[in-house]
Amino acid sequence: ELNGSAGQDRWVKLSDELWRVLEQGQGYAARSGGAFDMTVGPYVSLWRRARQKHQMPPSDLLAEARQAVGYKKLLLDPQTRSAKLLAPGMRLDLGGIAKGYGVDEGLKVLQARGFKQALVAGAGDLAVGDPPPGKQGWRVEVAPLDVPEAPPARFVLLANAALATSGDIFQRLEIDGKRYSHIVDPRTGVGLTDHSLVTIIAPDCTTADALATTVSVLGPKKGLKLVENTPGTAAHIVQKPGRKIKTVESKRFHAFYE
């Protein structure tokens, strides 16, 4: 209903769950200068079709989509918990945050029913409660890059924490030897080309999911600065933009290694 109201100058009352996701998402959008943007739906649709056809999105359609993208075009009213989409053709895409929220809610259900030692996973995102019996934490692999010369996989131990990884291992488009990620930079409308994997550890999976996407778009320098300024979070970034593999981590990440 909200997507259908785009450009109609109409406020739409939201469910409590949708409100919480949009409110948190807009916070990351503002903090990242638009590197995280839930209004990226028009771009995502173009790149999804591009992967199906193995063709770059037409420049005219990208230009048209650009008019309907921008986090400042999504307004939220905390008094009524309503939202308004200012531009015609806007379409929210919550792929960078809602999965993490769903994982968090799943863990809450288990814990409320007495399962304190639990793990909930959702396609690359996970949240854990207390450690398994006799263990310091849940042993989780940090996803390695899918190239022959990639460093060996390492493992972290997690307890009452969450982890999310974003990258182009499974969803990408290759044209003329250039690799485009399914993660689209909302500021340009183009899929990322740095062949990266970003793993975030955070107190909750909503935060981990949103930061993994945000840091992917921002890149290591600005991304690590954002992580260092977000309490309780840590980042591991591995890239292969050219011939060399680059790995960087935030200061807090090493504390999680087994």
Image (cartoon, rainbow, N blue to C red):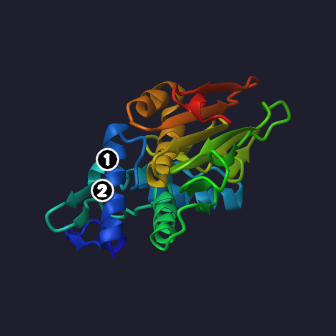
Q: Amino acid at mark 2?
A: Glu
Distance between mark 2 and mark 1 Cα atoms: 6 Å
State left or right for residue 64 relative to residue 76: right
Closer to the camera in the image, 19 or 139: 139
Closer to the camera in the image, 130 or 21: 130
Q: Which image quadrant for residue 148?
A: top right
- Residue at image location 43% in from the left, 27% down from the top: 225
Closer to the camera in the image, 244 or 113: 113
State left or right for residue 254 relative to residue 31: right
Q: Amino acid at mark 1?
A: Gly
State left or right for residue 63 relative to residue 130: left
Residue 23's label in the rendered image is 2
Label 1 Cα neighbours within 10 Å, binned few <14 / some 14-19 / many ≥20: few
The outermost residue toward the left is: 79
The outermost residue toward the right is: 148
Residue 27's label in the rendered image is 1
Q: Which image quadrant for residue 20?
A: bottom left
